[in-house]
Amino acid sequence: DPELRVRFTSPHPKDYPPALLTLMAERPNICNHLHMPAQSGSTTVLERMRRGYSREAYLELIDDVRRLIPDVAISSDFISGFCGETEEEHLDTISLMEKVQFDQAFMFAYSMRGKTHAHRTMEDDVPADVKNRRLNEVINTFRREVQLRNNEVEVGRLRLVLVEGESKRSTPENKTFSGRTDQNKRVVFPAGSFATEEEVLKHLQSSGSGLDIDGQSLLAMKTKVELSRGDYALVQVEDARGHTLKGTALWRSSIVGFEQLKSICGSLDSSTVPSQTLSKQLIL
């Protein structure tokens, strides 16, 4: 089903053969999101964890992924205060996060578990206050870097959003929807009646003007639909608050139609957005 999104979940960083990355780049319905749990940015900590890769190998994999899938989003896991972790090793994790700029991260202080290699051979010797301080520094680094990345990569962009339903803060007076992008980023946008993709694509194909479609043209389109859970919507991202995006839905869309839109518009660097939304250039 070309309209069914497929998303990979949490494989080990060593389990990314080039064929898998090539397939992701080729298939529009395979999401451009990978969860690549680093756990630490220090090679010596990774060795004690028996992760099977070094900091350098992990960064090389990140470079390969972003080269093959330029629009990919990468999430990760991090543990602060693993057995014997030094301040220098902790700072290696901070520098890895700054270098990669993860789109999402799950961060925890280390807690010894039974029947593990660490439980049998190591001592949980990092004091709790040090673990918590390091964890806070990891969290603050992620928050700072994800804001910088979303401001650069997401704001002003058109995203295909799979509608999940009303947002948590939606009210009868101010109804808003929440959904996920191809990159697994949450987007909140106002509800309403929207043009259909069929009419929009027909207009664009007949006008031959790229994505130069104004708000009045959208309003004049005869068919209007209400979005519901499971629909795709074309959303222009207007703001980023941490790893949550806010935007405006333009029309009901689809995976296949989104690809058609890209082919119609050709080079998108000089495309303009509808006048009812931001008067800026946008990029697909």
Image (tube, rainbow, N blue to C red):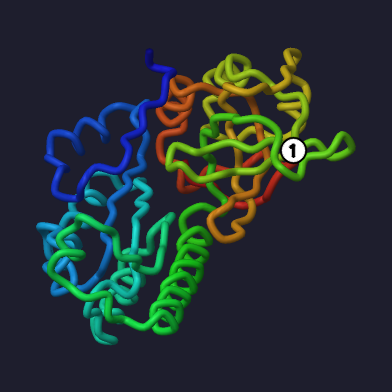
In this rendering, the answer to whether 131 lies above or below 280 is below
Q: Which quadrant of the figure contains the N terminus?
A: top left
User: Percent position (x, y) of residue 51?
Assistant: 15, 58
User: Percent position (x, y) of residue 134?
Assistant: 40, 79
Label 1: state its secondary structure.
strand
Determine which quarter of the picture holds residue 161.
Answer: top right
Determine which quarter of the picture holds residue 135.
Answer: bottom left
User: Percent position (x, y) of residue 58?
Assistant: 18, 60
> Mark 1 — residue?
176
Q: In the image, is 1 to the left or to the right of 140?
A: left
Of 20 and 194, nearer the camera is 20
Q: Which residue is drawn at 49% across and 71% down?
A: 144
User: Percent position (x, y) of residue 200?
Assistant: 61, 21
In this rendering, the answer to whether 176 lies above or below 101 is above
Looking at the rendered structure, the number of numbered marks drawn on it comes to 1
In this rendering, the answer to whether 268 lies above or below 241 is above
Residue found farthest to the bottom: 87
Q: Which residue is drawn at 64% across and 51% down?
A: 238
Q: In the image, is 187 to the left or to the right of 248?
A: left
Tell me which amino acid carries mark 1. Answer: Thr
